[in-house]
Amino acid sequence: MMRWIVLLLLLGLVGAVAKSGCHVREFYGIGYTIHNPSERHQQMIQWLKNNAPYCKVDDYVMIWNNLPNWAGTSDTAQLRSAVIEGYTEALARDKK
């Protein structure tokens, strides 16, 4: 019984660690799996808010360069602004 409890705790820790990070492929996935433009826009904005502290400058450059393809008709000034804001925050983090 104790082994199962330890196993569950370890799996919980692995899941918690795996969720924190900037995985650009998740952002890419939103673009290619959500077909409703307004829903895709909201999901992309939410992804940027949730992952901003973990993304690096190179991640934001990749997102920016591919945003027209990944966002499609969801590519708005608000989405571009969120990417620029995240980029400037990542630059500040890298300088520390």
Image: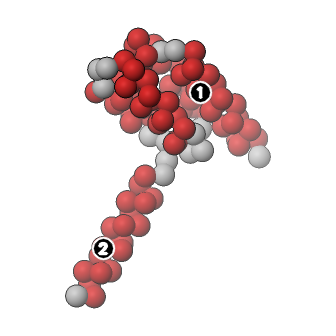
Q: Is residue 65 left or right of residue 93?
A: left
Q: Nearer the viewer, residue 5 or 60?
A: 5
The residue most toward the front is 38
Residue plotted at (39% across, 20% down) = 38
In this picture, is 44 found above or below 37? below
Which residue, given by chain and number where applicable, does mark 2 sit on?
8
Marks 1/2: CA–CA distance: 37 Å
Which element carries disc 1, helix, strand or loop?
Answer: helix
Left or right of 70 on screen, residue 45: right
Q: Which label was assigned to residue 43? A: none
Measured as percent of width and height from the top left, residue 5 is found at 30, 81
Front-most of residues 41 and 30: 41
Residue indicated by mark 1: 82
Image position, residue 90 (x, y; %) = 66, 37
Q: Is residue 70 shown above or below 90?
A: above
Q: Is residue 61 left or right of residue 17?
A: right
Residue 43's image quarter?
top left
Element type at marker 2? helix
Residues at badges 1 and 2 in contact (C-beta under 8 Å)? no
